Image (tube, rainbow, N blue to C red):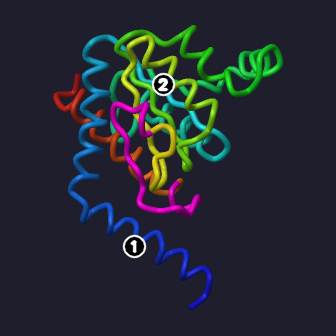
Amino acid sequence: MSNTLQQIKQLSALCDQLGENMQLVEIIDNIAEAIVKAYKNGNKTLFCGNGGSSAEAQHLAAELSGRFKFERKPIPAEACHVNSSFVTAVSNDYDFTKVYSRYIEGFGQKGDVLIGLSTSGTSENIVNAFIAAREKGLTTVALTGDSGGDLKGLSDLILKVPSGNVPRIQEMHLLVGHIICEKVEQTLFENGN
């Protein structure tokens, strides 16, 4: 079997696992419900990640704040790293492990949702952000790989992709993120509001 076909089959097998695991499906539904609740209470969704996960964080924030599948009012969502001046200042004045926790301390509000994407669940800057978020009363949601890492004990909700393969985990995070965005959009705007 070619490497290309092998990678496609790996992703397909993970999708099958997700679809057959009702506990994982329920977690996805619960994440969407937590985000809907936050919006109904006038709150927002914040995202953080590193590398490819930061790109996915920004992508998913844009799906919520712009639009996903149909015309509707924008809703507040942002990736914590998009202000490069803030990121570089905090990284320089403190260190990179504090960049997201400082963002949460400055911009997070009780009732907001923080979604951290970390394939390992051990990224120190995301772990610190979750600690800060819990202190401020944010709902913490982690999308990780199979172990959950340190985020397992800091998350109100955690979806652990049953894999240790980083690219496949990231691909599943994007799939799960899109499902969540669609559910949030449908729930909030099902009557065209």
Q: Give the crowd class for mark 2: few <14, some 14-19, many >=20 residues within 10 Å.
A: many
In the image, what residue type sits under mark 1? Ala
Q: Is residue 115 above or below residue 106?
A: below
Q: Spot the residue most to the bottom.
A: 1
Quarter of the image with the C terminus is top left
Which badge, 2 or 1, is on the more N-terminal residue? 1
Which x, y percent locates residue 157?
Answer: 34, 36
Q: Is residue 27 above or below residue 43?
A: below
The answer to whether residue 22 is magenta is: no
In the image, what residue type sits under mark 2? Leu
Q: Residue at x 55, y 24 (%)?
A: 129
Which x, y percent locates residue 132?
Answer: 51, 17
The residue identified by callout 1 is: 13
Task: State which quadrant residue 97 falls in.
Answer: top right
Quarter of the image with the N terminus is bottom right
**C-beta proximity under 8 Å, tags 2 and 1:** no
Q: Spot the residue most to the right.
A: 92
Q: Is residue 92 left or right of residue 49?
A: right
| SS assignment at label 2 | strand
The circle on residue 154 is none
Q: Spot the residue most to the left.
A: 191
Front position in the image: 5 or 169: 169
The answer to whether residue 163 is magenta is: yes
Q: Residue at x 32, y 69 (%)?
A: 16
| SS assignment at label 1 | helix
Marks 2/1: CA–CA distance: 30 Å
Task: State which quadrant residue 81 falls in.
Answer: top right
The residue identified by callout 2 is: 46
Q: Which residues are magenta?
A: 152-169
Q: Residue at x 33, y 66 (%)?
A: 17
Which x, y percent locates residue 160?
Answer: 41, 50
